[in-house]
Amino acid sequence: MLIQTAQLRKDVETSEGILHILKPTDLKIEAGETVAIVGASGSGKSTLLSLLAGLDLASAGDVSIDNVNLGDLDEEQRAKIRADKVGFIFQSFLLIPSLTALENVMLPAELAGHKQAEAQARELLSKVGLGDRLTHYPNQLSGGEQQRVAIARAFVGTPKILFADEPTGNLDATTGHKVEDLLFQMNQDSGTTLVMVTHDSELAERCQRVLRMEAGKLTEVTRDVA
């Protein structure tokens, strides 16, 4: 099992008492699966994604990636797991303004010590249709182009898992659909496991599994089989 949780929970102290952001959750995701997590704003879906990726620490319970319990690791060790096995795509792109498209894509691979960082970054940017934009800075690119750079960056280093948080949330419908097609095509080509938070029901339906988060409780959405 590539991703597994056991009674994973996240609580936050507030002035009005303990807020249960994520109630005890058991989840299993196999290698190669595409999984969408849907739910209203504030339901806890982005918190779950952060816990699965080791970006946030649980209040209780366990989360494992590739049979490694993240709770047994310190922050440096969790960062290494992320560098070796995980790619990220965010709604706000999170490109570094002072770096070119090529440098933005190269950066995670360089930090992870990959010797072919530049060659892989050039190949990925070509795959996402930006082979002629290598030296452009983020402010010289459209929103759709910036998200394509972010997708290329997520796939650099050939991660086992891709976590995406509202990957088309800042794009218009036409551009969003193009980016979706690109994301799923690249994911299929690379055999990556995709775990995506989205409010877009059509985008969620493109995934093999849909999980719904309501008030911190996760349930699997049952689909009709034609």
Image (cartoon, rainbow, N blue to C red):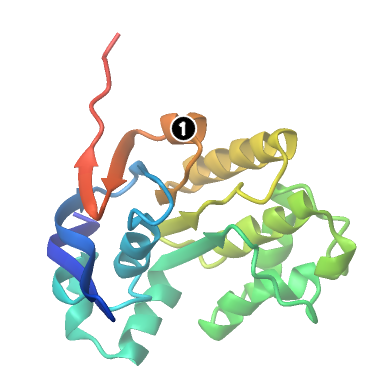
Viewer-nearest residue: 168 or 10: 10
Above or below for 54 versus 184: below
Residue sitting farthest toward the front: 16
Regarding residue 154, the answer to whether it shows in the image is yes
Where's the C terminus, which quadrant?
top left
Q: Position of residue 119 (x, y in %)?
A: 70, 68
Element at label 1: helix
Q: How many marks?
A: 1
Q: Is residue 80 above or below residue 206?
A: below
Question: Where is residue 41 shown, x and y percent of the image?
Answer: 43, 52
Of the 4 image quadrants, the one containing the N terminus is bottom left
Q: Residue at x 70, y 46 (%)?
A: 171
Q: Is residue 111 left or right of residue 118?
A: left
| Residue farthest to the top, as pictured | 226
Q: Is residue 22 above or below residue 221?
A: below
Picture residue at 69% right of the left edge, 71% below the top = 95
Q: Label 1 neighbourhood size at 10 Å, few (<14), some (14-19), many (20+)?
A: few
Q: Classify residue 86 as left or right of residue 25.
A: right
User: Looking at the image, which is closer to me, 25 or 88?
Assistant: 25
At label 1, the amino acid type is Ser
Is 35 on the left-hand or right-hand side of 148?
Answer: left
Up-down relation of residue 187 to residue 13 (above or below): above
Percent x, y of residue 25:
15, 56
* Image point (62%, 64%), residue name: 153
Q: Quadrant of residue 147?
A: bottom right
Mark 1 highlights which residue?
201
Q: Position of residue 152 (x, y in %)?
A: 64, 58
Image point (24%, 58%), residue name: 3
Residue 115 shows in this picture: no
